[in-house]
Amino acid sequence: MYGIISPRDWGLARAEAKDLQDWLNLGVAAGEWDERGRKATYEWLLRNWREEKGAFAGHCRIAEGCYEQPQLTNLIAPWQCMAAYDRYGDADLLQKAVRAADWLHANLVETHPMSVVVGAVRDSWCPEEVWTKFTAEYVILNLGLYVRTHNQEYKRRAIQSVRFLMQAELHDHACKFNLKEQRWITRGWQSFGRIIEAFLYLFEVTGDHRWLGRALAWGEYGVSLQAPDSSFYLINEEYYNTDLAADELRAFVYLYEQTGLPQFLWAAQRFADWHLRTQRDDGAWLLTVDRFGNPVSEYVGPGDVPNIAVALLRVHRATREPRYLAGALKAMRYAVGQQVVPGSEHPHADSPDALWGYWSWDPYYDYTMSGDQVTHYARGLWFTIDYLASLPAEEQAALAETMVEEYDLAIIRDEAA
């Protein structure tokens, strides 16, 4: 099961409090994690909903007390709605995901029949460019809606958009296309992981092996990009960025699970171990590092951290190596500290626009929050607790001791017991 939207995509059941009473304390009791995700959805994300447009607002500028107009946030924020729908059965959340996807289709997707890149998604900052990164996310969004609504239109849109990804492959794995200049561009954000995930999800949904073939081709290309230090420098072939890490890591594991080919698991473990070596004491990773290991800035993208944690959970699932679970849990310990909760010491904690939201930058830069960042956080919460609860009791007990003794992660004990 190769979806990335919800724990249901991995076949995981919703964790109950009793399943987590003897698990780990990462700054927030395990039984509170689900509630934090619910609050991030109902108390923050839905404040960003714009009924008249049928879409989510762009960045919320907390200090200025204003919201940007809807933009590419509507690629990712609907994932949180779908994950919450899977969890709570709230049909209104699924309907909002549908409307956001429809808004995106009408406003940011190339649909003209004469275009050579029909189905591609525009960059809202540079609308003359369409990106493979965004288009792959759009494929995943539409397939998620198709699986949940059974509306054939969303499968049609997904297949239409993967044709752009196929064209990109034929043009030296180009990362974008300039509509004005009618030119493919190979330098930029080489996010091959999202593309692999999109093809694998389409293969899972349709059973058509040609999509598996395309995923394998992109996987072989991805392996060729791995640097000698085991990382990937996917921005202009020079910079590692946390936004281009989780999907690449997951994609290799998915390919290994589907094919059994060891080179994909080897690439995943090398990249995962690079993350463990470079993980900060607080559990986060620097946003950008150059090919020589130099930090580009002091900043962290807080939403990327739980997304990487989810990827490390999948590496643990494939290998059962405790170090990957430890890395994921340390990352989530960091992540829960970035949510603005009542009584916290975060700036603007008294602002209703900020409450239960999630910062875009650490340290604080422009005091913005966005639906894509909070979506990664909420999904990280839900994937983590559901994955932990899925482990057999004896494995949980052994891991709990390992986490305490080897990785210094505190444990919640059941006082009644």
Image (cartoon, helix red, strand yellow):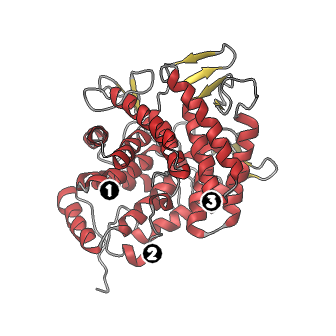
* Residue type beneath disc 3: Arg
- Residue at 25%, 26% (x, y): give it: 228
Q: Which mark is residue 16?
A: 2
Task: State whether residue 107 is above or below residue 390.
Answer: above
Image quadrant assignment for residue 30: bottom left
The residue identified by callout 3 is 148
In this rendering, position of residue 243 left or right of residue 289: right
Q: Where is residue 28 in the image (x, y as percent from the top left)?
A: 41, 65
Q: Earlier in the sequence, mark 1 or mark 3?
A: 3
Residue 237 lies in quadrant: top left
Residue that protrudes farthest toward the left in the picture: 405
Residue carrying label 1:
317
Categorize mark 2 by other alpha carbons within 10 Å: few (<14), some (14-19), many (20+).
few
Residue at 41%, 38% (x, y): give it.
Answer: 248
| Quadrant occupied by the C terminus | bottom left
The one nearer the camera, 275 or 354, is: 275
Label 1, residues with CA under 10 Å away: few <14, some 14-19, many ≥20: some
Mark 1: amino acid = Arg
| Residue 372 appears left or right of 257 | right
Labels 2 & 3 near each other (Cβ < 8 A) = no
Name the element at disc 1. helix
Local crowd size for mark 3, using a 10 Å CA cut-off: few (<14), some (14–19), many (≥20): few
Real-space Cα distance between discs 2 and 1?
Answer: 20 Å
